[in-house]
Amino acid sequence: MNGPKEVNARDRMIVALDLPTVKEAEAMVARLGDSVTFYKIGYQLAFAGGLSFAESLIGAGKKVFLDLKLHDIGNTVAKGVESVAKVGATFLTVHAYPQTMKAAVEAKRGASLRILAVTVLTSYDDADLFAAGSKLGVSALVAQRAGQARDLGVDGLVCSAEEAANLRKLVGPSMALVTPGIRPAGAAAGDQKRVMTPARAIAAGADYLVIGRPIVEAADPKAAAEAIFTEMKQAIT
Ligand code: C5P
């Protein structure tokens, strides 16, 4: 994984295309134009034709993060990762279970695809983990899984900006930290509970920022993207 210093600053801003149809996604990408180079496609769009759309975005020179959070037996994960690698995606998420991470890392070998692990979903608190059978609470399980991800050669972690500084200490400089929950000062938090401004997230050690509603739902999405990018760039230099 290239460190953030070698990555073009604009490529560090990832716009979440959380939209119901490819038609709406195409219109948003057209409105954003050259202001956005990197898009995230999750369940909503992926299962509504978004995987072919991902291929056309890549064909048009954009980078794509497929947020599919894979988790299955190793063989099935490996076959899925091989298919995603052929599509030419840049990032793919998997849940941070050792078998799953190991299979994903081995299957993408040689491809430009990078595997990101989701340690503990941010909607889970300690009680949710205990109810699901975990003996560890959130912070201990995040630390355990981040260490396992690093040891298995996973390329990066999805984490909140609040966790970024601690995780950076734990995993070292080479893993990419990718953080959602970004809100420019004054923007509505929506359902995000722990939010950070773009500049503070970069200062906390985030390499890539995932931004959805503050751009996609803005009256002028391109202007919103440019304002966020300007704030990021100032924090980077
Ligand atoms: O609209 P908003 O900026 O909150 O979008 C953030 C994006 O990041 C969404 O696609 C959401 O699913 C994703 N995400 C998140 N929190 C996580 C992991 C992913 O908000 N812990």
Image (cartoon, grey):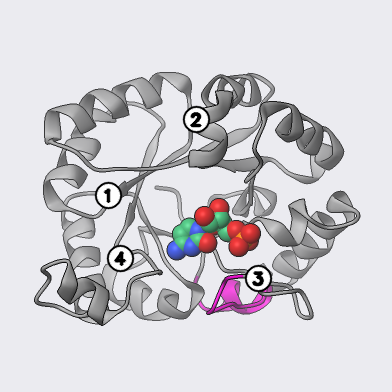
Residue shown at 48% from the left, 24% from the top? 88
Which quadrant would residue 99 be assigned to in this image? Answer: top left
Q: Earlier in the sequence, mark 2 or mark 1?
A: 2
Q: Which residue is mark 1?
A: 154
The answer to whether any part of residue 94 appears in the image is: yes
Q: Nearer the viewer, mark 4 or mark 2?
A: 2
Up the image or down, 223 lies above or below 32; here it is: below
**Contact (Cβ within 8 Å) of mark 4 with mark 3:** no
Mark 3 element type: loop
| Segment colored magenta | 191-205
Amino acid type assigned to the residue bearing label 1 in the image: Val
Specify whether tag 3 is near ligand 1 (CB below 8 Å): yes
Q: Position of residue 75 (x, y in %)?
A: 13, 28
Badge nearest the viewer, 1 or 4: 4
Residue 179 in view, yes or no: no
Say whether marks 2 and 1 touch (CB < 8 Å). no
The residue carrying mark 2 is 47
Quarter of the figure with the C terminus: bottom right
